[in-house]
Image: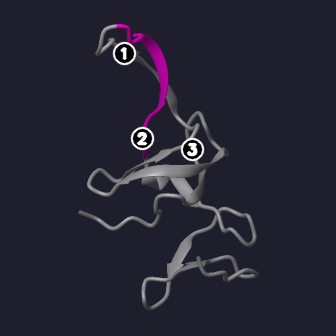
Amino acid sequence: MSKMFVKTGDTVQVLSGKSKGVKGEVVAVSPAEGKVIVKKVNVVTKHVKPKKMGEPGGLIEVESALYASKVQLVCPKCGKATRVGHKKGGIRVCKNKECGNEF
């Protein structure tokens, strides 16, 4: 397993793909695959079969996973997409020169 620079609940910006430039909240993180699921980004249609009697089936829209390298963390203080630095104790730091905010 590898460590991830994003956590569930972080705000990220998509760097490449059909949703480039979109900001969203991380819903789930999968360190084993190196992927993240971002709310309202990379939406795909999924065919669903009804499981129980009376439950509807059909097409539903679901967020699909993205590689973590395609997203960049957004600093809550300056609001820009930034690289992540680390201090002792596992504290994440904004790498923008003007900011330097801990999150």
Which contiguous range is marked in magenta? 54-66
Q: Look at the numbered disc 1 and give the secondary structure of its residue.
A: strand
**Of callouts 3 and 2, which one flags the residue occurring earlier in the amino acid sequence?**
3
User: Label 2, on which residue?
Assistant: 65
Residue 65 colored magenta? yes
Colour approach in the figure: one colour
In the rendered view, tell whether residue 60 sits above or below residue 62: above
User: Label 1, on which residue?
Assistant: 48
Residue placed at 42% from the left, 10% from the top? 56
| Amino acid type, label 1 | Val
Which image quarter: residue 84? bottom right
Q: Position of residue 86 (x, y in %)?
A: 48, 82
Name the side, left or right, on which 25 lies relative to 88: right
**Of callouts 1 and 3, which one flags the residue occurring earlier in the amino acid sequence?**
3
Q: Nearer the viewer, residue 55 or 96?
A: 55
| Amino acid type, label 2 | Ala
In the rendered view, tell whether residue 63 sits above or below residue 86: above
Q: Position of residue 54 (x, y in %)?
A: 37, 8
**Of callouts 2 and 1, which one flags the residue occurring earlier in the amino acid sequence?**
1
Q: Look at the numbered disc 2 and give the secondary structure of its residue.
A: loop
| Amino acid type, label 3 | Ser
User: Label 3, on which residue?
Assistant: 16
Residue placed at 47% from the left, 58% from the top? 8
Q: Position of residue 73 (x, y in %)?
A: 58, 62
Q: Look at the numbered disc 3 and give the secondary structure of its residue.
A: loop
Q: Residue furthest bottom?
A: 88
Q: Quadrant of the C terminus?
A: bottom right
Residue placed at 31% from the left, 8% from the top? 53
Q: Quadrant of the N terminus?
A: bottom left
In the rendered view, tell whether residue 56 sits above or below residue 45: above
Q: Please name which of the two marks, 2 or 1, marks the residue nearer to the observer.
A: 1
